[in-house]
């Protein structure tokens, strides 16, 4: 299987996914301002192509999650290529992946869970650099006291709140 990428439609807009020759996901992207911007983020030098069956399964799961038809799938089965990420980023992303749809955790709770209490701001920065949303559901991590916190995807906090609304999340609940 060759590396490639594909764009696909979801309830929140046109997303993208990239994969390696090993069939693992090397990038997922929430909608950008244009298809060209989305493609540029995920291409990694690969050509746009028809996704292999394993990647199509991921696409179908992202579509079902973002339209609210399958909130039981937490996408933890998706194999991600985390090469090039720091140990800190990997730890943050692994904790975020365990947050089920419809639930949230705070930046501070994630920091505590990775064994680095007091690193909530660094957790926020790592999530802002997340190359796998919504497979790594950074939208489920919020600020303390029920505040939303930031969101680096196009649309910012509005996109974050839209994803949380689709998942019927209540801020501050685990």
Image (spheres, rainbow, N blue to C red):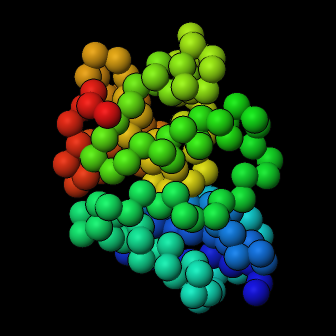
The x, y position of residue 141, in whole percent, is 41, 34
Indicate the quadrant containing the C terminus: top left, top right, bottom left or bottom right: top left
| Residue in view at x 54 percent, y 38 percent | 95
Q: Is residue 154 above or below residue 113?
A: below
Taking depth in this image into account, of 95 and 146 the one nearest to the observer is 95
Q: How many marks?
A: 0
Q: Position of residue 8 (x, y in %)?
A: 44, 76
Q: Quadrant of residue 134?
A: bottom left
Residue at (50%, 73%) from the top-left corner? 58
Residue extending furthest top?
Answer: 118
- Residue 75, position as x, y percentages in the image: 47, 61
Horizontally, residue 144 falls left or right of residue 17, namely: left
Q: Nearer the viewer, residue 159 or 133?
A: 133
Using the rendered image of the protein, determine whether residue 50 is visible from the camera's viewpoint.
yes
Relative placement, left or right, of 33 versus 53 is left
Q: Nearer the viewer, residue 4 or 63?
A: 63
Residue drawn at x 59%, y 81% is 54
At x 29%, y 67%, the residue is: 70
Q: Is residue 155 visible?
A: no
Quarter that holds the N terminus: bottom right
116 left or right of 45?
left
Q: Is residue 147 left or right of residue 109?
A: left
Judge whether 67 appears above or below 143 on screen: below
């Amino acid at each position: 299987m060759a590396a490639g990428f594909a764009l696909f439609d979801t309830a929140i807009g046109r997303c993208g996914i990239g994969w390696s020759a090993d069939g693992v996901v090397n990038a997922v992207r929430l909608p950008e301002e244009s298809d060209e911007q989305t493609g540029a983020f995920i291409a990694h030098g690969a050509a746009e192509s028809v996704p292999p069956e394993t990647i199509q399964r991921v696409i179908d799961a992202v579509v079902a999650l973002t339209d609210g038809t399958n909130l039981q799938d937490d996408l933890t089965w998706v194999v991600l290529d985390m090469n090039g990420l720091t140990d800190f980023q990997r730890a943050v992303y692994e904790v975020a992946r365990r947050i089920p749809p419809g639930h949230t955790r705070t930046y501070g709770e994630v920091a505590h869970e990775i064994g680095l209490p007091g690193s909530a701001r660094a957790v926020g920065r790592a999530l802002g650099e997340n190359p796998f949303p919504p497979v790594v559901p950074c939208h489920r991590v919020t600020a303390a006291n029920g505040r939303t916190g930031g969101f680096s995807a196009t649309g910012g906090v509005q996109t974050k709140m839209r994803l949380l609304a689709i998942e019927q999340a209540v801020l501050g609940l685990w």
